[in-house]
Amino acid sequence: MGIKVAVAGKGGVGKTTIAGSLARIWARSGQNVLAIDADPASHLHHVLEIPEERRPPPICEELELIEERTGARPGDGSGPFYKLNPRVNDIPEKYSVMGADGVRLLVMGTIRGAGTGCFCPENSVLRALLEHLILDREEVVVVDMEAGLEQFGRATCRNVDFMLIVVEPGARSVETAARISFLAREMGVRRQGVVANRVRDDVDRRVLPRMLAARDLNLLDMLPYSQTIAREELEGSGLFPAMKDEGWSSAVRRLSQKISEIVADKAT
């Protein structure tokens, strides 16, 4: 069975770029890969080079599907009478689209959290779908999580094999990573590590490991700042040329191997 990886981090640290790059590297190695966009910002299709007109619709907005599977239509005032464990095993094939390197993309949309007063049929479908993707699927699954800490109140990825926390040079990013790590452990995710992104110079390479070690965070790797990625993010060309850059691809491949080795080692 393929590994299941959740990618988390503070907003703006390059979480989506790394999630999509990992998915493409695993696909290039011959794995079947399903990328899950669970971030309401929903930019993973750019990294997978899927044009805007082909981007799959968020499952949370598929009202007819939700009504069919739960017996209740979102927003119709039907109250608490809907299925809590709807059938979802056919959704990935029907609602995903193929992107670069053969990675399939499925867009989840927003899972509303505890404390919002939302006990709704769309939440029922999304939670059941995430559980199916993580526990039952045979392929590699990479989940691009919502930025920040909100999702940990919803325990959306408690059963993943590994949680990758993305940081960039800066105290706020590291503090957020420490909080994410703590909350992930609270919900049972023991295998986790940190990747430092946009590392520019020797100062970053010297200071960041000390900052992370002081917070008991396991640094897996450091990825270099990429002008190619910065330019693509600025221009929004619809392509992701960084995957043709051997430096970036080699760095992400190295990271993917480290994650795979950790998961394989813990499984034995």
Image (cartoon, rainbow, N blue to C red):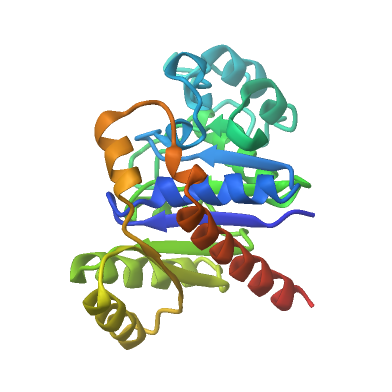
Image quadrant holding the N terminus, namely bottom right
Residue 30 x, y percent position in the rendering: 75, 47
Image quadrant holding the C terminus, namely bottom right
Q: Is residue 89 left or right of residue 213?
A: right
At a point 63% along the width and 22% down the height, the residue shown is: 95
Residue 206 x, y percent position in the rendering: 28, 83
Q: Quadrant of residue 167?
A: bottom left
Q: Is residue 165 left or right of residue 105?
A: left
Name above or below for residue 136 compared with residue 224: above
Name above or below for residue 196 compared with residue 28: below
Name above or below for residue 106 compared with residue 203: above
Name above or below for residue 13 compared with residue 188: above
Q: Is residue 230 left or right of residue 245?
A: left
Q: Nearer the viewer, residue 81 or 220?
A: 220
At a point 34% along the width and 44% down the height, the residue shown is: 228
At a point 64% along the width and 30% down the height, the residue shown is: 83
At a point 33% along the width and 53% down the height, the residue shown is: 226
Any part of residue 73 in sight:
yes
Q: Nearer the viewer, residue 214 or 130?
A: 214
